[in-house]
Amino acid sequence: MAKKEDLLLLGLSEAKAAETLKNVKLTETIGSIIASAKESGELNKQKGNLLYQLATKLKPQVAPSAPLVVKYIMNDGIKTEPQLSAAIEYLLSHTVKGIEVPAFEKSCGVGVVVTIDDIENAVTKVINEHREKIVAERYSFPAGKLLGELRALLPWADGAITKKEVDLRFLELLGPKTAEDLAPKKKEKKVEVPKATKETAKTNGTSADNKKKDITPTAEDDFSEGAETMDELLRTRAHFHKVGENFKTDGYVTTPKTAELLKAHVAAVGGKVVTRFPPEPNGVLHIGHAKAININFGYAKAMGGLCNLRFDDTNPEKEEEKFFTAIEDIVNWLGYNPARVTHSSDNFQQLYLWAVKLIQVIKTELKSFFQIPILQKLLRNFYHWSIC
């Protein structure tokens, strides 16, 4: 476990170090990372900052690979936050597949040097492409759009330096902010465009029933304002893992069969997002359920997937047919149609059979374990084995 002096070694302030020490799990992670770093050389503020970020971003399933990242931080192969994020993402994506060092190095830009001149030239290029609009909109122009394009051009550039350069160019081009620039902007009401009919769609060479082709956010998208619809919100702001990449989630336990099982899962769902809304049919739904319905059904719809209505009917004493019916009606009233209607009780018999099998396996293992003479003597009066 890391001590206060170790945290100060990473460049943390006294207050931040004291606060970090209260988090036992994080402190343990930092301790192991520092121990690994000390084997590779001397620490400085830049490396210390990256090591601290590594400790805070590292998920349990990739923790065993932390020494690899530490090694590249210490030998200056990884020097910026974008490189570190890419390195962690690579480890997470290859939790099941396994790590290949050349691919790892390529994925996080090991050996790539981005100079100040490179950043200045890239900023000049992007500013020139949007100059007319920037001059017209002044400081209302979404700088995030430019930063997104710059990340695409120079993925391994230092983000803080890049933003500083963009701010400087805005100042040079537009001058200081005026009172008008600082005043709150009034939102313009967008004119609603009628949905395309089949006839107009044919004229335009498209189908009115076509789904959105591209639902992936890009560097071109500006998310400075809130989404106007639930569909847009879930398409652009809900950054969930892709189908079959469950192992990227916090606390996901991997086994030698994980890759095989996830591959089978992807095949079973046809590569589509499949969600479920699991209410208990023992009462009417409330506003919290409405939120859950919109998230579960809405996300599946936005991603072109399916959502099941799965009744969690595990308390038969309080469940009534009228609640089953009312819940389905409310889901339909909110504009959603379940792909399937299922029940927890559909699986009870299989769960029972698995439980019996598990008990039998455990008993077999324990019987073998308790053949040890000293354990037999100690536990003779406490256990009676019966046949399941």
Image: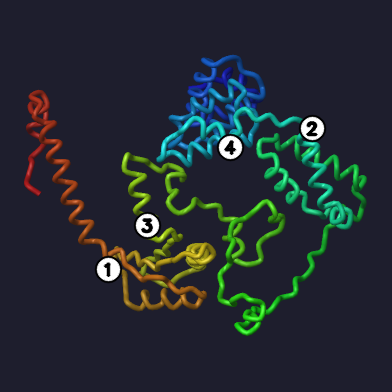
Label at residue 85: 4
- Label 3 sits on a secondary structure element that is helix
Quadrant hosting residue 285: bottom left
Q: Hey, what amino acid is under mark 3?
A: Ala
Relative side of 219 to 87, left or right: right
| Cα distance in 3D space between marks 2 and 1 | 72 Å
Disc 2 or disc 1, which is closer to the eye?
Answer: 2
Distance (Cα) linking label 4 and label 1: 51 Å
Residue 173 location (% of width, % of height): 90, 46
Q: Residues within 10 Å of mark 4 (few under 14, many from 20)?
A: some
**Depth check, front residue: 3 or 357:** 357
Residue at x 48%, y 73% (from the top left corner)? 336
Badge 2 is on which residue? 117
Q: Nearer the viewer, mark 4 or mark 1?
A: 4
Labels 2 and 4 touching (C-beta < 8 A) = no
Residues at marks 1 and 3, CA–CA distance in whole angstroms: 38 Å
Graded by Cα atoms within 10 Å as few (under 14), some (14 to 19) or many (20 or more), the crowding at tag 2 reads: few
Q: Which mark is residue 267?
A: 3
**Amino acid type, mark 4:** Ser
* Mark nearer the N terminus (1 vs 3): 3
Counting from the top left corner in percent of width and height, residue 14 is at 65, 23
Q: Are marks 2 and 1 in contact (CB under 8 Å)?
A: no
User: Whole-Å distance between the Cαs marked 2 and 3?
Assistant: 48 Å
The correct choice, above or below, for 345 with respect to 200 in the image is above
Amino acid residing under circle 2: Asp
Q: Earlier in the sequence, mark 2 or mark 4?
A: 4
In the rendered view, tell whether residue 223 sits above or below residue 345: above
The residue indicated by pointer 1 is: 317
